[in-house]
Image: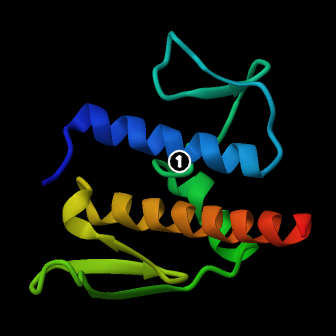
């Protein structure tokens, strides 16, 4: 079941917040005048799940491979696979948004994995 537009929007902002934390940003706040705009001090953070100018550089910076395949949960559903992360197109308003979301999710997994192994 697809989530509401508000829930989807909040999930994108949550992914962007997590990525920002993993990239070392502290004291992240959401701008109340512009919902979904995350700020560090007065600087707006990139909207990685919603803007190709922000998301695109992540592909090269983290060597993210992008493949297309089937959603294992739905026999006839298509999905994007980024670094082992499978994101069904049906969970997103557009194919573009699904791809950006998958890229961000893949980078988060890479950074969390690196952080976990650095601590040991």
| Mark 1: few/some/many CA within 10 Å (<14, 14-19, 20+) | some
Which image quarter is the N terminus in?
bottom left
Left or right? Give the position of 112 relative to 102: right
Residue 78, located in which quarter of the rendered image? bottom left
Residue located 40% across and 35% down the image: 10
Q: Which residue is mark 1?
A: 15
From the viewer's side, name the closer residue of 55 and 109. Answer: 109
Residue 114 at what x, y percent from top left? Answer: 79, 70
Residue 80 at what x, y percent from top left? Answer: 36, 78
| Image height of 113 relative to 41, above or below | below
Seen from this angle, which residue lies furthest front? 120
From the viewer's side, name the closer residue of 18 and 34. Answer: 18
Residue located 19% across and 38% down the image: 4
From the viewer's side, name the closer residue of 17 and 94. Answer: 17
| Image height of 91 relative to 118, above or below | above
Left or right? Give the position of 18 relative to 22: left
């Amino acid at each position: 079941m697809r989530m509401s537009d508000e829930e989807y929007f909040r999930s994108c902002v949550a992914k962007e917040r997590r990525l920002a934390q993993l990239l070392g940003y502290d004291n992240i706040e959401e701008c109340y005048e512009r919902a979904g705009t995350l700020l560090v001090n007065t600087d707006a953070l990139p909207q990685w799940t919603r803007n190709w100018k922000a998301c695109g550089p992540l592909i090269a910076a983290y060597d993210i491979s992008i493949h297309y395949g089937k959603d294992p949960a739905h026999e006839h559903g298509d999905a994007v696979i980024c670094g082992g992360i499978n994101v069904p197109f049906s969970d997103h308003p557009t194919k573009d948004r699904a791809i950006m979301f998958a890229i961000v999710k893949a980078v988060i997994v890479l950074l969390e994995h690196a952080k976990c192994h650095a601590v040991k």
